[in-house]
Image (tube, helix red, strand yellow):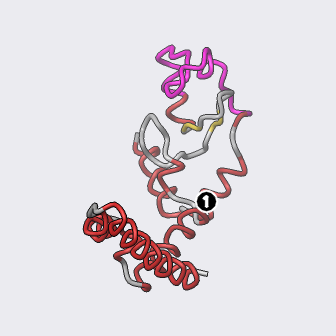
Amino acid sequence: ELCNVRQMQSLNQLAVTKILKKHDKRTRLSARSYYPIFMSNDPFFTLNLSQSMALAICDRFTAIVPQLDDYLCPICYGLCWKPIRLVCRHIFCLRCLIKAQRTDMQDCPVCRHPKAVSEAYADQLDTPLMNMLALYFPRELKQKKKDNDRE
């Protein structure tokens, strides 16, 4: 598929060059001289085939494979250990939520949803997410547990 896209791109580039040549001939303008500069600024047209394939594969994998940054607690910036999902659908560590409730924090720190923190309970523990985090991020979860035990 990527090879077909690359072939179509080269054909389109040739067609644009011919169109600009005809345009310059009819209008006596010099648009064709600026076309190579325009094309050199676009990475799709300057990369070779192997680089293009590597970028395409990388984009697809990052969409499929879970990324650690997507599961960080917005309060402590660590991996959500025993994640609690609030009514506003944001996820926080159990420990961070307990600390927030002790300081009388009422609203969600991310979206300011009213009373989201004060109404959070242990039954809102996101068990499927906790299992997924244990599967994909065991080292980070172990480190977070050690940090929590130290406190």
User: Closer to the camera, 56 or 49?
Assistant: 49
**Where is the C terminus found, in terms of image quarters?**
top left
| Residue name at image x 36 percent, y 78 percent | 47
Q: Quadrant of residue 125?
A: top right
Task: State whether residue 108 is above or below residue 14.
Answer: above
- In magenta, the rendered stretch is 98-123
57 with respect to 128 (left or right): left
**Where is the N terminus found, in terms of image quarters?**
bottom right
Task: State whether residue 19 is above or below residue 113.
Answer: below
| Residue name at image x 49 percent, y 25 percent | 109
Q: Quadrant of residue 54?
A: bottom left
As helix, strand or loop, the secondary structure at mark 1 comes to helix
- Name the residue beneath numbered marker 1: 134
Tell whether position 102 is magenta: yes
Q: Position of residue 4 (x, y in %)?
A: 58, 83
User: Closer to the camera, 71 or 101?
Assistant: 71
Looking at this rendering, what residue extends furthest in the front direction?
26
Q: Main secondary structure of the magenta part?
A: loop
Task: State whether residue 37 is above or below residue 114.
Answer: below
Q: How many marks?
A: 1
Tell whether position 112 is magenta: yes
Q: Position of residue 146 (x, y in %)?
A: 44, 52
User: Closer to the camera, 116 or 110?
Assistant: 110
| Residue name at image x 55 percent, y 18 percent | 107
Amino acid type of the residue tagged 1 in the rendering: Ala
Q: Position of residue 20 (x, y in %)?
A: 38, 69
119 with respect to 148 (left or right): right
| Residue name at image x 52 percent, y 35 percent | 95
